[in-house]
Amino acid sequence: MLLLTFLTLSCAIFLLAWLLYEVVILLIIRKYKDVQEKRALKLTEELEESFIFWEKKRMVFIYFTPFIFAGLGFLLLRHIISVIIGFILGLVFPNLMVNIARRQRLKKFQSQLVDATMMLSSSLKAGLSFIQAIEVLCEEMPAPISQEFYLVLKENKWGISLEESLRRLRDRVPIEEVNLLVSSILIARESGGELTRVLSRLAETIRNNLKLKEKIATLTLQGRLQGLIMMVLPFAFAYFVYKQNPGHFDIMLETNLGRTFLVVALVLQIIGMILIQRISRMKV
């Protein structure tokens, strides 16, 4: 009788633990799915702002990138730390790709801005209104600058004032040259200045500004490459040593003093990365 009671109690405890385990796992999966769905929606909206249209079905890769990177980390180092780092990198990777895509689009927009400004000035000199000049720009210029100015035209047709549409353009394309262009147009329209002359001078100013930025980028290229090498070198060296002698870092991982040194080294490495980036980056 006592044995039967013990077995019944053990089975009940086991079933209760199993049910709790199932509930916890389901809650974690549901929470992870909700978080990733929100991220997918946000990334889709950010891509659409850059006129990059992806179906929501294609954004399903966001759910799997953390596990893919975690698996790659395990295959490379076969350690729980590499799995955790890989999972974190997988979470960050989609945002990183979206930021790279938006940065490339802004850079392309910036390179087209001088020609677009000259086209606006030429159209105004030919006797066209400013709206008609924008229409010519949308027809003649390639993406992405034609897409952004076409959106200005659409907003204007929807009843939004041209000034407000240009301000929205400045918010969508947060670069210095666009801010300068929109501010100059708004001031000229409010003060009654000659917009053709303003745009001609502005095109020359933007051209000189871009040339100066390219020159600075060329002069700081060596420093940025050195910084990149110094960022990668410690991790590459540690990986090479670990593959040659897996027990080489045991004293660092198994003792409190060794783990403290590793944390201090990692913090100093991050500080060094930030300082190198700050030193090699100049604002014009």
Image (cartoon, rainbow, N blue to C red):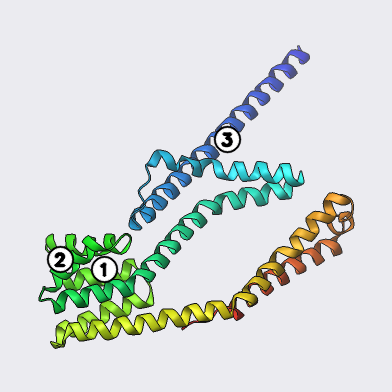
Which of the 4 image quarters holds residue 102?
bottom left
For this rendering, which residue is in front, 166 or 248?
A: 166
Q: Mark 3 belongs to which amino acid?
A: Ile
The amino acid marked with disc number 1 is: Arg
Q: Which residue is mark 2?
A: 160
Residue 148 as seen in the image, left or right of residue 13: left
Please report the residue visible at 67 percent of the width from the left and 26 percent of the height from the top.
Answer: 13
Query: Real-space Cα distance between discs 1 and 2?
Result: 10 Å
Residue of label 3:
25
Counting residues from the start of the chain, the first of labels 3 and 1 encountered is 3
Q: In the rendering, which numbered label is found on residue 125?
A: none
* Rendered residue at 58%/49% (across/down): 90
Task: Tell me if mark 1 has few (under 14), some (14-19) or many (20+) residues whose alpha carbon lies within 10 angstroms of its own.
Answer: some
- Residue 122 % position (x, y): 19, 76
- Name the secondary structure under disc 1: helix
Relative to 182, say whether 231 is above or below: above
What's the amino acid at mark 2? Ile
Which circle, 3 or 2, is nearer the viewer? 2
Residue drawn where x is 15% and y is 77% of the image: 124
For the residue labelled by badge 3, is the local secondary structure a helix, a strand or a loop? helix
- x%, y% of residue 213? 47, 79
User: Mark 2 or mark 1, which is nearer the start of the sequence?
Assistant: 2
Task: Judge whether residue 13 can be spotted in this image.
Answer: yes
Residue 161 appearing in the image: no
Give the quadrant of the N terminus.
top right
The answer to whether 195 is drawn above or below residue 12 in the figure is below
Disc 3 to disc 1, how far (Cα)? Answer: 45 Å
- Residue 274 placement (x, y as % from top left): 62, 73
How far is disc 3 from disc 2 in space, using C-alphas?
Answer: 50 Å
Check residue 168 in the rendering and tell me which mark sits there, or answer none: 1
- The structure residue drawn at horizontal position 60% and vertical position 75%, both measured from the top left corner, is 221
Indicate which label's residue lies in the foreground, 3 or 1.
Answer: 1
